[in-house]
Image (cartoon, rainbow, N blue to C red):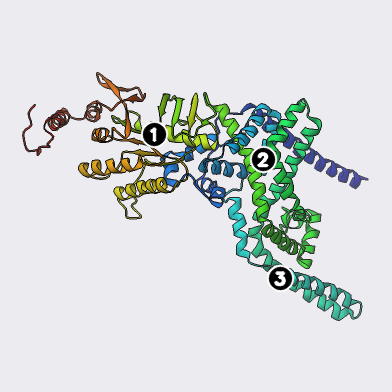
Amino acid sequence: MEYIIFAAAMVGFILLIMLKGFYDYKKSEKKFIKTLFDTYGTLPQREYKPEQFENISHYYLKHKDGFSIDDITWNDLNMDEIFKRMNYTYSAAGEEYLYYILRKPCMDETEFARREEIIDFFRAHPEERVAYQFIFSKLGRTGKFSIYDYLDYLDELGQRSNLQDYLSICLLLASICFMFVNMPLGLAAFVFVLVFNNVSYFRVKEEIDPYITSFAYVFRVLEAVKELQAQRSHFQKNGSSKTDFAKKEEADALSREFETLKKCGGTMVSFKRGSFLVMSGGRMSGANNPLEMILDFVRMGFHVDLIKFNQMLAQVRRNLPEIDAMITALGRIEAMIAIGAYRQSLTEYCVPEFTSEKVIRAEDLYHPLIENPVKNDFHTDKNVLITGSNASGKSTFLKTMAINSIFAQTIHTCLAKSYTGALFYTISSMSLKDDIQGGESYYMVEIKALKRILDLRGSADAPVLCFVDEVLRGTNTVERIAASAQILKSLSRGNCLCFAATHDIELTHLLEDIYYNYHFSEEIEEEDIYFSYKIMEGRANTRNAIKLLHIMGYETEIIQEAELMAGDFLKSGVWHRLDCKITQ
């Protein structure tokens, strides 16, 4: 009786632990769901490890066709930080697709309308948004590698066959049968085959174990597809407090994505069947689970997990286009949710309007990474040359224009009160560095970057919008002005709209028939300098480089001599040797 009571107590204790675990899980689940409601549009707090961030680009690299934002432009505009600012996703599929969108400007207004439908639906229906986000959180990320790395990794296994494993099973069964004919010989044969099967099992198991991770994300993708379909079916059937109009709204907005998920998910049904043999967390782990221990003996003797692995491998290889299509559909849905959350986080934004004219019109335009930005209005149908003092805002304005032109054609959201422009190919040459490892000077890096813009202008089948900051700053004054004038003249031709910033006032005169002149200025009061960061018409008529030396505490002699030299040059047009005495 005491043993029965003890056994019952142990069973009760185990059940209590299981119930506590289940309760804690449900409690954390509810807390997370509440967080999804409460933090919608709150700045993401995620930290990125370098290797994790590098993998985010792999969906884009796999689908890189046609025009895209190239690496120079991406780095010029600090788009990595901008991506982090708007990455409200919870799955690898979502964040990789969001990255892809930012690097692939869309040229199809019909596609913008479809994206807008999905964004608007989830912003208007928080319950559906949270339900979908919870499913995406379970899909999760992939750790050090992209799902596409894992899928490519499978190619290293080469072609595989189950013939040897089937032969091992047949030999084991034959030895068992032979025991009924001749027990000693049959038993010896059975032991020999069993040992052979075990040895060969561990050899193959060691070979395939690293690749099982590749199946894990595919498995989670299929689970996410199943859960999303169930969630959608539940909503359309019950609707909770939603109206019939809302049901139709979701059906219209997500019809293409769910059509893809249903079609492609159906081709992978057998992938999940029996997958526990391979995917079980306790597989060959020495766990104390009695069922797993029995299964481990079956695996070693009959190679059932090796056979299933090869079947799963063949199915993944056969259905790579379907897997890619499911990841794309899932990623697209979550990316649209993230764009909606990003909009929610903004103080002001607009949905852009597009025109066939080579023009940009913007009101209250601002930069996404500046905490308290100064907003600018701007309208041009002609190339623009911007001058101004150091730190006056030229480069920031160029980046603001470039980023918003990309935003217009990617996330269909501009940081402005209003924005109208053409569907452009956007490209820049702004924040370049010399290539020490490649042995190239700054000038060589710069002329290569400018050449790619000229090449795009000559070959593009759409208007090109280019941004150039300080043309040819890496060479001497005379040649810089001459070459810059000709390059900017060339960029003004054809179907190209060019924005350029320069310190060379000479260019504003040389190019005034081709470029509109704009400038930024500043005011100096006592020992400080004030910038308005407002763009104004006309060329700059102030300089502040020497004044900034004074404000920063440089020696008075350096300041005075520099001012004398500059004033003398402006009068005579000639620089004098430093050992010559300069007078006012």
Distance from the alpha carbon under mark 1 to that under mark 2: 37 Å
Give the residue type that dot 3 points to.
Answer: Val
Is residue 413 positioned above or below 530 on the image?
A: below
Q: Is residue 522 left or right of residue 314?
A: left
Residue assigned mark 3: 199
Name the amino acid type tagged 1. Leu
Seen from the viewer's position, the closer of residues 228 and 110 is: 110
Asked whether, in this view, residue 373 is left or right of residue 57, the answer is left
Q: Earlier in the sequence, mark 1 or mark 2?
A: 2
| Residue 221 in sight in this render | yes
The disc, 3 or 2, on the residue closer to the chain's N-terminal end is: 2
Q: In the picture, residue 570 is in which quadrant?
A: top left
Horizontal and vertical percent position of residue 61:
53, 51
Judge whether 171 appears above or below 559 on screen: below
| SS of the residue under disc 1 | helix
Residues under labels 3 and 1: Cα distance?
A: 66 Å
Task: Give the total number of marks visible in the rendering.
Answer: 3
- Look at the numbered disc 3 and give the secondary structure of its residue: helix
Q: Is residue 315 left or right of residue 142?
A: right
Position of residue 394 relative to residue 435, above or below, is above
Q: Which residue lies most toward the top here?
A: 526
What amino acid does circle 2 point to? Phe
Q: CA distance from mark 3 to mark 2?
A: 41 Å
Please name the residue that numbered disc 1 is placed on: 398
Q: Which one is earlier in the sequence, the residue at label 3 or at label 1?
A: 3
The circle drawn on residue 3 is: none
Q: Which residue is mark 2?
A: 136
In this rendered view, identify the residue nearer to me: 34 or 347.
347
Question: Which part of the image, by quadrant, shows the C terminus?
Answer: top left
Rendered location of residue 25, percent (x, y): 73, 37
